[in-house]
Image (cartoon, coloured by chain):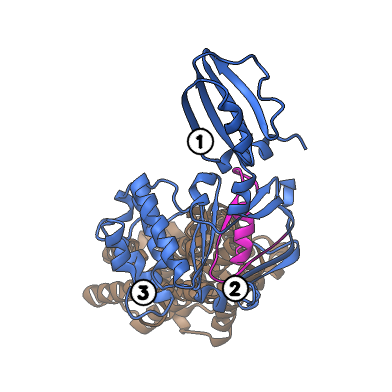
Chain colours: A brown, B blue
Amino acid sequence: MTALPILRRTLRDLSRSLAWWSLGLIGLAAMMIGVYPSVRESPGLEDLAQNYPEALQELFSFGGGFDYASPAGYMGVELFSLMVPLLLIIAAVATGAGAIAGEEDRGTMELLLANPVSRRRIVTEKALAMAAETAVLGAVLWVALSLGVAIIGMEISVWRVGAAVVAAVLLALGFGAIALLTGAVVGRRGAAVGITAALAVAAYLVNSLAGIVDALEPLRPLTPFFHYEDPDPLRHGLAPAHLAVLLAIAVVAAGAAAIAFDRRDTCR
Amino acid sequence: MDAVIDAVELTKRYRGGARGVTGLTLSVTPGEVFGFLGPNGAGKSTTIRMMLDLLRPTSGHVRVLGMDPRRDGVAVRARLGYVPGDLRLYERLTGRQLLRHMAGLRRMRDLGDGEALAARFDLDLDRPIRALSRGNRQKVGIVQAFMHRPDLLVLDEPTSGLDPLMQREFGRLVRETAAGGGTVFLSSHVLSEVQHLADRVALIREGRLELVSGVEELRSRARSRVEVTFADPPPPGAFDDLPGVVETGREGPRVLLRLEGDADALVKRLGGYTVRALDAHEADLEDVFLSRYEEPR
């Protein structure tokens, strides 16, 4: 029939969950932007925020630091420091882990592999489907945030918001590809989700706590979160070198997944 | 002609010591229906899954359609149809959507013989697979394996869940396929399922190939059961001197005998008695196999 049947089949299977995820992200954007006007008008909140313990500030800071008053600061703390990457990572990891290991768990891989398609092609098309899904979620989030910004007259460039969304999508793709890789190695979806989640939490904590625990500082560049938030895309836009690192994580992990799956026995 | 399947010393050992397959050598010729028999867990599916490159052999090798399933997997599977032993389908699709997906993966422009086969097996392609019975799911598995008219069909317990009527239809399909030049590798744990279809059968037990034999040859070696009802039963052991005859039991005037080979001597001996009824069951290969299963190793 037409090209990329596995990609199209996977996207069709994802369409319902994609709709729910989109609704969730739109709701999140509406809520966070909706309360901004009241935050802006109560300077006391800013003082309160500045009195947070340092550890909390580090956990929820995004880019340049913990600043609740400016539009970029507010959006960083409320959305891009945790919620947005968390949600996009969950979506990408669910899809990535399900790509190979999910079909093996359900037993449908046997049927898929009876067809004249190579295992590498299966991994490639599934990885592309995951990338497309995450990109769509990013686009939905960006449109929702941009509309909100325009409606309440928030003083931030929608292009800067877009830059942060792009960075978050690439970050999520990295972890999604790692889930794809672990699934391609172990063949069990639950294990792939668990291992990737543990990695993501560890990476997040290392990056966030490095500000107060000096010993962690040298490890920061090893975490994807550093390359996601350090260039502070909400204030400075995209930093190609950091984006390249995020993209490389996704591409290398997906490539390794193709090789790993190609080399082993399939599970039943 | 070159063998369609050629396994040489094919061995699969699983990690953790689970039994696989040891030193399996067999060859399937073009156009034949090859029955692959053995009890559950004997290694039938393991062997088949190596032919499809789902598993990689620990040692030895197998060539399918003259190619290496690992290196030329795509080319091999383009000419092959497969019904997995543990068939799992995409639950959310309808039968037709699943067949379309499979056809897309095979770069077919339509469903090939899919619609006709579904009609033949009385399968409703518009129902979602999750709503189908086990037998109907099995039909989907059969249709997707046959719809592109493959040169080789690898069928792992293909009739499980099918009712007798559909099993018969499936038998006709297998025979038509072979008559059309296709080769069929048919695995089963029940001999009766394949003895009327297969040209040759192989028996695998505990991961080892026990025998490969023509069905006719096996049948001629098989023993038949003869049940004679006498007016006046002869004393026990009256037939023990006849070659190939063993008395296996008695119920009043009925004497049960097992006959191997020629029946002539027995018939002539029976001529000396008043026989009220005579019942001979055709040689059942099941018995041959059962006696092999039961043999202590």
Amino acid identity at mark 3: Val
Residue for badge 2: A258
State the CA–CA distance, disc 1 to disc 3.
69 Å
Q: Where is residue A159 in the image (x, y as percent from the top left)?
A: 37, 84
Q: Who comes first in sequence, dot 3 or dot 2?
A: 3
Q: How far apart are marks 1 and 2 (CA)?
A: 57 Å
What's the residue type where badge 1 is placed?
His
Q: Mark 1 lies on which chain?
A: B
Closer to the camera, B255 or A141? B255
The residue that mark 1 highlights is B281
Instruction: Give the left or right position of residue B132, taking residue B34 as reference.
Output: left
Query: Seen from this angle, which residue lies furthest left?
Result: A151
Q: Nearer the viewer, mark 3 or mark 2?
A: 2
Q: What stretch is highlighted in magenta?
A: B25-54
Q: In this view, does B237 lie above or below A121?
A: above
Q: Which residue is drawn at 63% across and 77% down?
A: B1
Comparing B64 with A188, the one in front is: B64
| Residue A136 image label | 3
Q: From the viewer's perspective, is B40 left or right of B211?
A: left
Residues under numbered marks 1 and 2 in contact, where contact means CB atoms less than 8 Å apart? no
Which label sits on residue A28? none
In the rendered image, residue A236, in percent from the top left (x then y), is placed at 47, 84
In three-dimensional space, the C-alpha distance between marks 3 and 2, rounded to whole angstroms, equals 24 Å
Tell which tag, 1 or 2, sits nearer the viewer: 1
